[in-house]
Image: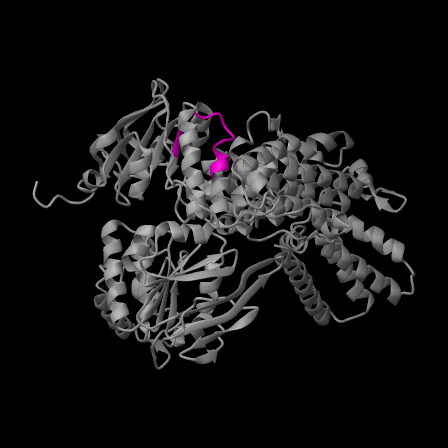
Amino acid sequence: MTAATSEPALIEVRGLSKRYPGVLALDDVSLGVRAGEVHVLFGENGAGKSTLISILAGANQPTAGEIRFRGEPMRLASVHDARARGISAVFQEFSLVPQMTVAENLFLGAEVTVGGLLAKRRLKRMAVEIIDRLGFPLKPNARVETLTRSEQQMVEIAKAFRAELNVLILDEPTASLTERETDQLFELVARLKAGGVGIIYITHRMQEIRRIADRITVLRDGKFVATEEAGVAEGRLIELMTGREIAELFPEVRSEIGDVRLTIADLTTARHSVDAASLDVRAGEIVGLAGLVGSGKSEVMRAAFGLERIQSGTVHLDGEDVTGRKPGEMMDRGLFYVPPDRRDEGLVMIRPVRENITLPALAEPPLAKGLGLDRRAEKRLATTLAERMELRPMRIERTVDHFSGGNQQKVLLAKCLTRETKVYVFDEPTVGVDVGTRAAIYRFIADLAERGAAVVLISSDLPEILHMSHRAIVFYRGRIRAEFEGEAITEEALLSHFFEREAA
Amino acid sequence: MKAITTFFRQPWLFAFAAAIAVWIATAAFTQGQGAGEVLSVAFTFATFFVIVAIGQMFVVTLGPGNVDLSIPATMTLAGTVSMKIMDGLNWMILPGYLIAVAVGVVVGVLNVGLIRVLRIPPIIATLSSSFIIQSAAIWYNRGLRVKPPTMLADFTTAKIAGMPILALLVILIAAVMHVVLNRTIYGRTVIAIGQNARAARLAGLEVNRVRFLTYVMCAVFAASCGYVLAGFSGGAALNMGQEYLLASVAVVVIGGTSVAGGFSNIPGLWGAALFLFLLVTMLNTFGLGAGVRLLLTGLIIIAVITLAGGSRSSER
């Protein structure tokens, strides 16, 4: 194979396999990561990237194969074991204790004691040292639950620095970061590289590969496909990843724009996350909402859907005043909100796909028969929608947590097809899904608009907004900052309204 | 073939297997003598366990932190109040039962009120409400033991071919509740809330209403149990609910319901209740001292829960 071994690898895996009951998640994978390189793992959801890094981080044991660290075979019994050798991972799901402070979390499991008591002051000082070295804007005494997601990620990264660091594993670290925070992260990555740290980096974003990758290893269906040098053509990577060619990521939206469906007027939420925002959405139109995390782009639609308390302002759906109605009532009237976090708000992970898909439609005919459920109708509906979303594998009785991220997302999207809906709101619909599924999701959204639905697309992914929206609205600190239409929607135009204005 | 494997994956299987194993062990010890009677008595007492456990199971399914600790007090209050009001009169049996149900509804509303309005965690709320309820029972009853109406006593102790009529009735109720859990919007909502209350809310389900209904239902089951138990044992006693606190939780867990919410099953309640009673009977038959008996009871319960839990995690 092409895994170059001319230079000695810092960490290397040979013939690594992992078998779960009924699935071979990793199949004889070999690759090496050199000191001072950023090695990107690239592949569709379910390709085996997560399994591979969980083994390298000590969280999972391989069924076969070996791991070599500086040429020596080694066994990583636990995450702690791996950390002791300077191998640290930052997973998408954080392992932080929300009620504890930043400093306490940093040294959780590695506390320093004096005579059996915690050396609190020393721990805090050590925490400050790490935070300062990394240049993170974190307060050591802040409780983790009060931090934003990106700040929590910083804590998670900082944890890796409490001992000498040799290998840092980052699993889609920018998924919840703003542009500026991403820049900071990349600066840090550059510094670590210079210091000889080997970095294993998982991402779906081409832009990031272009920016920081030294080598890219592509996995597909648990197998090693190829290791490419930086500068490889994107088309080639996608071909390697999917095993086929993908014509175009973004579809052309050919819809006819009709009457106003949803009108939000002068809306202010009770906790002022949104301040006097007004917008409307027409039938057949896709309106993109852009802005930083916490800028109000998501909150405004959550408030309209009845998930946040409204202080003043109104929400009208097809002319009817629906201000302050509950989510169930909003769905009855034709507004459907698809949440960004499928684990947290979207899906009941340990229940079957069938139950998840039909959850919003339970209380409605044809599923509801009096107080009872028509199980045959339920099964029929779930099957139809799962087929329409091309769920893979097509097993609706399987629990959701057994599916790959992209397929979980398909289940989440299928839910909004169970109800007759006039206005669809998608909040970060493509977070953590592979390119193949992304293309499918964009096609799905375009289809809805072409069939006459009004669509609101909330996204932190700028290309998504640029390519999909008829109109784009930028939020900043709870207010609407700017609005662009058609050709005027450019990256530059949008970005110039994202941040504090230097000089007005 | 597939049907067989799914059958063996049922989490309630362990509870029944354990119950049967314990029964056989007892019968072997006595060389088969009285095995039939033991089973008949087991059904009699398991019935009371199952009545309270059905309600507790629905509450536990609501998700982590949800449990009703006021069951014993509710049983006592419903038992004492209904016995006193019926005053041994046969024609009062039905009104007496309705009074017991009303007691249950009041308790349920009180519990939900504490949980929702005052935002007290369910475990504390139901524990503190049980003090109030128990005190009410003491105050109302003043230590008097009123005999149940003769027809009620006869009904609760009646048997057909060795099988208690009450047990048959509760098997029927359990079957109905099984359907409620698996085939109604209410049941599906309980399961969804237990696993992801936010997803349930976003799906437009009535989360608060369902929580309310579930706690009230649990209290009504407890009250009903207090009513029939008082009828069965010749009147209500202030400590009649005592062993039902642990029993209700143990039966739910041994029966294969996940304490983390979102997974539950009714058949397991019957297996677990029979197992619990037969286990104590077996240890009694073996003639062990009280200390050893309790120790073994605890150890065996842990073993069964571990076995049942193990089978479930490998299945997923």
Does A414 lie within the magenta span? yes
Which one is nearer the viewer's eye here, A266 or A446?
A: A446
Q: In this rendered view, identify the residue nearer to me: A352 or A371.
A: A352
Question: Residue B49, image x and y in percent?
Answer: 70, 49
The answer to which image quadrant residue B150 occupies is: top right
Q: Is residue A386 above or below residue A402?
A: above
Q: Which residues are magenta?
A: A413-425
Q: Quadrant of residue A10?
A: bottom left
- Residue placed most toward the observer, A182 or A264: A182
Q: Indicate the position of residue A464 as horizontal and vertical percent values.
A: 33, 40
Residue at x 44% of width, y 64% of height: A53
Image quadrant containing the C terminus of chain B: bottom right
Residue B117 visible in rendering: no
Location of residue A116 in the rendering, given as x and y in whole percent from the top left corner: 37, 79
Q: Residue at x 41, y 23 (%)?
A: A452
Near-viewer residue (B299 or A232): A232
Q: Image height check: is B32 above or below A434?
A: below
- Give left or right: position of B160 versus A19: right
Q: What residue is shown at x 68% (from left), y 44% (from top)? A: B226
